[in-house]
Amino acid sequence: MKDIKSKLFVAINEILDQRIDKYRKTIERTIDSKSNETKSSAGDKFETGRAMIQREQEMNEGFLNQNLTLKNQLAQINLNPNETVQVGSLVITENAQYFISIGIGKVQVNNQIVFVVSPQSPIAKALIGKPKGDVFSFNDINFEIMEIF
């Protein structure tokens, strides 16, 4: 089970790398589109088109920066196991597995679904500081922490 944590870390990095690559390529295409946009006799139409391309570029730059920040945050996480749930912990409950790190949602590793959640998420807040065997309540349902890696 400890092996899943390192594989999960690699899988998350791959997801982030794919997103970063996608946003970089999209930004490149929007820059090309903007430079290829030619002024026509309908000046307002030209300006509207350029403004839309500019907004798309800015939006994708925002997404790129978010994913670069997530990648940086992930790189700073201590993966050493602890006695209690901390940032960097892989937590196994009877119903689900949670990796407290960055918020990117479900990730499949070794045919297992792991919820990759940020420390600010409600489930992480319910888990952090709890030891193995502790029971915690989330959405009015009790869960037991079976294992912490």
Image (cartoon, rainbow, N blue to C red):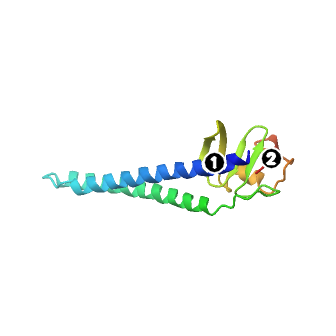
Give left or right: position of 14 versus 115: left
Tell me the crowding category of disc 1: few under 14, some 14 to 19, or many 20 or more residues within 10 angstroms, Cα based: some
Most foreground residue, 85 or 6: 6
> SS class of the residue under badge 1?
helix
Most foreground residue, 126 or 73: 73
Q: Disc 2 marks which residue?
A: 147
- Direction front: furthest residue: 3
Name the N-terminal-most of marks 1 and 2. 1
> SS class of the residue under badge 2?
strand
**Where is residue 96 drawn, in percent x and y?**
73, 40
- Direction left: furthest residue: 41
Kindly indicate the quadrant of the structure image that contains residue 108.
Answer: top right
**Where is residue 46 drawn, in percent x and y?**
21, 53
- Find the distance from the CA under tag 1 to the CA under tag 2: 16 Å
Instruction: Name the kind of residue labelled 2 in the image.
Output: Glu
Most foreground residue, 55 or 78: 78
Give left or right: position of 83 versus 118: right
What number of labels is visible?
Answer: 2
Q: Quadrant of the N terminus?
A: top right
Residue under the point 56% across and 62% down? 72
Tell me the crowding category of disc 2: few under 14, some 14 to 19, or many 20 or more residues within 10 angstroms, Cα based: many
Residue under the point 58% across and 47% down? 11
Give left or right: position of 123 versus 70: right
Q: Is residue 126 above or below residue 140?
A: below
Instruction: Name the kind of residue labelled 1 in the image.
Output: Leu
Residue under the point 51% across and 56% down? 67
Label number found at residue 8? 1
